[in-house]
């Protein structure tokens, strides 16, 4: 289940920007709009989970239904011949897919006696699924080879995702029964669904600074998701999708190192290192190339583990410790809504516009200038955070907390 869940996402998400630019002649703004569907899905997902999954139907049945419907819309995206036709299909797909991220976790946790020990061993298969999808694209089917990309072979990534989604959809109905726990007669508010019950955490100045920084650092994050693969492909890096799997391998490794770093240096330094890594990554992207500077690009990709784990995973741990038992779920819902919803929505919009600004007359991009912008934004966020955030201890041990990577 976990392997297929992230194999599906990785099979098309990494190369979508390249596909849209080369094969559907999409502008940077249009590519940004396509990636923003993830944010809209993240905003809508709590309603599907809170109003339906947690109250009326078994989680595994909803998971199966969503993936079967998702397979249809990925197939329609595969057949699209223009951005205007493509966009509505990928929008509907992401609205269907984003709730499944919570559903696979629900199915997992309900079967475990000790999630803190058992869940990481299950969740890591999701990262493996993402890695395998990238390797298949680059080294099995060669869809991202220069000639194959120009011939439109990247559209097959959506077909691969559709097939995997259909397989997981059928397979989900064989998963252990995971009935809803909530009482369907109990009233539930929009405030509760969106995690707004935890909004009182923002009265704490330290947490408010972290919350704002989390939204702002999503702008550099969006640049990576949207532009990294098109950048590597455009400058002539071979097998760009396969090489980008280094980022997921790094993510898994640094997750293991996070508790040690967290304990040795504390919360504030860990978060700052995570944000600084974004700036360093983009600086490397701005000076690297496909020949002598390839190693700089690979180091930049490998920094993904520090970029993501040291800030976002540490932030989940910090949020959990600040919320207390009463508002733990609401607090995680609120920070997810702020980052993957609001933050990424802003980030993809800015990234798309910047990409269009630096499109040159020859049809290529001034990538050096493009990458300098998220590098600068990350530095400004670090300065803001460093000045206003006061270091504090986190009571809960991160190593004992199951984390959604």
Image (cartoon, rainbow, N blue to C red):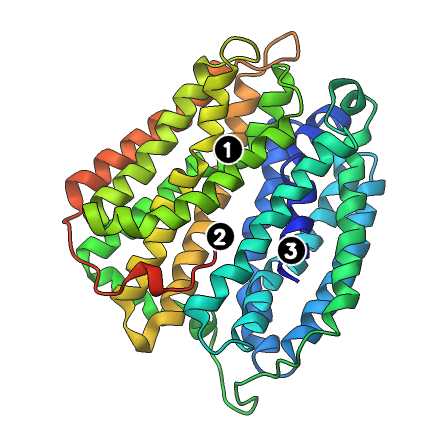
Disc 3 vs disc 1: which is toward the camera? 3
Residue at the spot of label 3: 3
Count of number-bearing discs: 3
- What is the spatial separation of the Cα atoms under label 3 and label 1, in whole angstroms? 23 Å
Q: Position of residue 209 (x, y in %)?
A: 24, 49
* Spot occupied by residue 75 in the image (x, y as percentages of width and height): 82, 48
Q: CA distance from mark 2 to mark 3?
A: 24 Å
Task: Classify residue 265 as left or right of residue 359.
Answer: left
Which one is in front, 40 or 299?
Answer: 299
Residues at marks 1 and 2 touching, judged by CB atoms closer than 8 Å: no
Q: Is residue 31 visible?
A: yes
Q: Quadrant of the N terminus?
A: bottom right
Q: Residues within 10 Å of mark 2 (few under 14, many from 20)?
A: many
Residue 151 in percent (x, y) is at: 83, 23
Which mark sits nearer the N-terminus, 1 or 2? Answer: 1
Decide: is 317 above or below 261: below
Residue drawn at (50%, 33%) of the image: 224
Residue that mark 1 sits on: 224
Q: Residue at horizontal 70%, vertical 54%? A: 92
In this image, 353 relative to 325: left or right? right
Which residue is at 62% across, 59% downward? 2
Which residue lies under the disc numbered 2?
Answer: 341
Q: For mark 1, give the secondary structure.
A: helix
Query: Which one is in front, 109 or 335?
Result: 109
Name the residue: 28% across, 44% down: 271
Q: Secondary structure at mark 2?
A: helix
**How far separated are the C-alphas under marks 1 and 2?**
16 Å
In this view, which residue lies farthest toward the bottom?
185
């Amino acid at each position: 289940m976990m392997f297929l869940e992230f194999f599906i996402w990785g099979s098309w998400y990494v190369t979508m920007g390249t596909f849209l630019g080369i094969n559907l002649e999409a502008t940077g703004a249009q590519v940004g709009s396509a990636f923003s569907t993830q944010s809209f899905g993240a905003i809508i997902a709590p309603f599907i989970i809170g109003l339906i999954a947690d109250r009326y139907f078994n989680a595994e049945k909803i998971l199966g239904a969503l993936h079967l419907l998702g397979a249809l819309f990925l197939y329609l995206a595969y057949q699209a011949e223009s951005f205007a036709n493509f966009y509505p299909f990928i929008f509907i797909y992401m609205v269907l897919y984003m709730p499944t991220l919570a559903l696979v976790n629900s199915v997992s946790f309900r079967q475990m006696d000790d999630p803190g020990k058992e869940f990481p061993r299950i969740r890591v298969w999701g990262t493996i699924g993402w890695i395998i999808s990238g390797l298949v694209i680059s080294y099995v089917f060669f869809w991202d080879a220069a000639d194959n990309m120009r011939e439109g072979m990247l559209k097959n990534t959506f077909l691969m995702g559709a097939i995997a989604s259909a397989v997981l959809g059928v397979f989900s109905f064989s998963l252990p029964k995971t009935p809803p726990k909530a009482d369907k007669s109990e009233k539930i508010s929009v405030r509760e669904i969106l995690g707004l019950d935890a909004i009182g955490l923002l009265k704490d100045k330290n947490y408010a600074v972290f919350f704002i920084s989390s939204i702002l650092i999503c702008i550099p994050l969006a640049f990576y998701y949207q532009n990294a693969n098109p950048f590597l492909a455009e400058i002539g890096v071979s097998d760009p999708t396969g090489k980008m799997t280094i980022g997921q391998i790094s993510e898994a490794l640094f997750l293991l190192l996070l508790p040690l770093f967290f304990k040795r240096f504390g919360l504030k330094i860990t978060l700052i290192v995570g944000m600084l890594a974004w700036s360093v990554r983009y600086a490397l992207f701005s000076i690297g190339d496909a020949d002598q500077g390839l190693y700089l690009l690979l180091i930049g990709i490998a920094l993904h583990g520090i970029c993501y784990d040291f800030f976002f995973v540490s932030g989940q741990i910090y949020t959990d410790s600040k919320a207390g038992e009463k508002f733990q779920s609401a607090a995680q819902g609120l920070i997810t809504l702020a980052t993957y919803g609001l933050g990424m929505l802003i980030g993809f919009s800015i990234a798309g516009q910047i990409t269009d600004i630096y499109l040159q007359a020859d049809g290529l991009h001034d990538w050096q200038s493009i990458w300098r912008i998220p590098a600068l934004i990350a530095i400004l966020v670090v300065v803001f955070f460093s000045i206003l955030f006061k270091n504090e201890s986190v009571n809960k041990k991160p190593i004992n907390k199951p984390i959604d990577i």
